């Protein structure tokens, strides 16, 4: 909220601000979801490496040249842009297996295979260019 307040103030006044953000505070907030999942779900989340256990697609994916591209689709708006832009229409965003994040997570193995196949003929630079054009965060 401090960052948002500073941005709002800058927008209104044109003056910036100095912020002091504690790393522990940020980490505790970031780790809240796994904590609640474990507390209320009765079991810890599965290990997912660089992927995310509750978001799909999310993580490193190989391009055709063997390099990995890391990206994550965070919502349904991004999902539609990802399918149309990054995948060049190779997937229908309304496909019932993948229409919602819950369905994408449930069908992660199938989805990951389709993404890898779609990227197989592209270099990492081409994948990144498509992701950038679609507005999908990537590295």
Image (cartoon, rainbow, N blue to C red):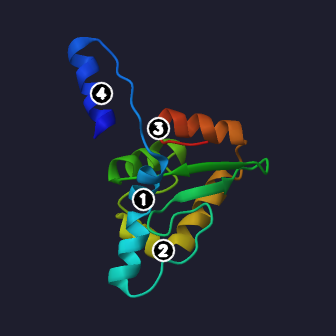
**Mark seen at residue 107:** 2
Q: Quadrant of residue 103?
A: bottom left
Q: Secondary structure at mark 2?
A: loop
Whether residue 59 is visible, yes or no, is yes
List the residue tagged with mark 1. 28
Residue 38 % position (x, y): 41, 80
Q: Quadrant of the N terminus?
A: top left
Residue, x 46% and y 50% (percent of image)? Answer: 83
Q: Earlier in the sequence, mark 2 or mark 3?
A: 2
SS for tag 1?
A: helix
Q: Residue 94 location in percent, x, y?
A: 35, 60
Q: Residue 105 in the image: x percent, y percent? A: 45, 70
Query: What's the residue at 41%, 66% (across, down)?
Result: 98
Q: CA distance from mark 2 to mark 3?
A: 23 Å
Residue denoted by label 3: 134
For disc 4, the marked residue is 6
The residue most toward the bottom is: 42
Task: Give whichever of discs 4 and 3 has the lower sequence position.
Answer: 4
Give left or right: position of 94 versus 91: left
Q: Would residue 102 appear left or right of 110 to someone viewing this image?
A: left
Mark 3, residues whose alpha carbon is within 10 Å: few (<14), some, or many (≥20)? some
Q: Quadrant of the C terminus?
A: top right
Left or right: 12 as drawn, with respect to 120: left
Q: Earlier in the sequence, mark 4 or mark 2?
A: 4
User: Image point 48% across, 57% down: which residue?
Assistant: 91
Describe the element under mark 3 as helix, strand or loop.
Answer: helix
Is there CB contact under 8 Å for labels 2 and 1?
no
- Badge 2, how many Cα within 10 Å: few under 14, some, many 20+? some
**Which mark's residue is nearer the viewer, 3 or 1?**
1
Q: Position of residue 54 (x, y in %)?
A: 44, 68
**Earlier along the polypeptide chain: callout 3 or callout 1?**
1
Alpha-carbon distance for marks 3 and 1? 31 Å
């Amino acid at each position: 909220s401090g960052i948002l307040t500073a941005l709002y103030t800058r927008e209104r006044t044109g003056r910036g601000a100095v912020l002091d953000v504690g790393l522990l505070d940020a980490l505790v907030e970031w780790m809240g979801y796994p904590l609640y999942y474990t507390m209320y779900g009765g079991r810890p989340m599965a290990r997912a490496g660089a992927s995310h256990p509750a978001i799909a697609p999310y993580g490193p994916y190989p391009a055709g040249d063997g390099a990995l591209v890391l990206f994550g689709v965070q919502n349904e708006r991004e999902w539609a842009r990802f399918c149309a832009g990054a995948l060049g229409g190779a997937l229908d965003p309304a496909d019932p297996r993948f229409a919602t994040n819950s369905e994408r997570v449930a069908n992660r193995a199938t989805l990951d295979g389709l993404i890898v196949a779609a990227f197989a003929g592209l270099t990492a630079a081409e994948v990144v260019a498509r992701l950038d054009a679609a507005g999908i965060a990537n590295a």
